[in-house]
Amino acid sequence: MKKFKKRINIDNATAFKLEYNDASGELKEKQFTSYKLMEQFHNRQEAFLYLDLRRFAKVEDKWYRFMKLRSPFVFQEELEFINKTFSENNDSANLQKHSIEDYNLH
């Protein structure tokens, strides 16, 4: 019999983490106690040379990577971007391979 995977509920998250590159180009991370605080930080940083790379939610003492979508509806092009985002390791060498439009899906 097939086992069911337990669904991760972001409402149960106790912490959030954001990995990003700043103007210096180095990878940094910052932890937050709520999703709202993380989004406020993200919105304040967009005016600077800042690129958010990965978002994590801590649910039951384990970090899960997630992505913020613009809409509950996902089209094929966005699905391909999502798959690419979760399957490749984004480091500063890979960032220049993608166009700015690719990162505007957040």
Image (cartoon, rainbow, N blue to C red):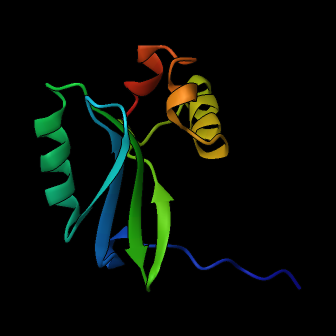
Query: Does residue 83 appear to the left or right of 30 in the view shown?
Result: right
State which quarter of the image contains the C terminus: top left
- Is residue 87 shown above or below 62? above
Q: Nearer the viewer, residue 30 or 87?
A: 30
Image coordinates for residue 93, horizontal then vertical, percent: 56, 27
Q: Quadrant of residue 27?
A: top left
Q: Nearer the viewer, residue 1 or 87?
A: 87
- Is residue 83 shown above or below 61? above
Residue at horizontal 15 percent and vertical 48 percent from the top: 41
Residue at horizontal 55 percent and vertical 74 percent from the top: 7
Residue at horizontal 23 percent and vertical 61 percent from the top: 35
Image coordinates for residue 11, horizontal then vertical, percent: 31, 73
Q: Nearer the viewer, residue 69 or 104?
A: 104
Image coordinates for residue 20, horizontal then vertical, percent: 35, 43
Q: Nearer the viewer, residue 75 or 57?
A: 57
State which quarter of the image contains the N terminus: bottom right
Q: How many tags in the picture? A: 0
Image coordinates for residue 96, horizontal then vertical, percent: 51, 18
Q: Quadrant of residue 52?
A: top left
Query: Does residue 30 appear to the left or right of 7 in the view shown?
Result: left
Taking the view exactly as shown, the residue that stands out farthest to the right is 1
Residue at horizontal 33 percent and vertical 61 percent from the top: 17
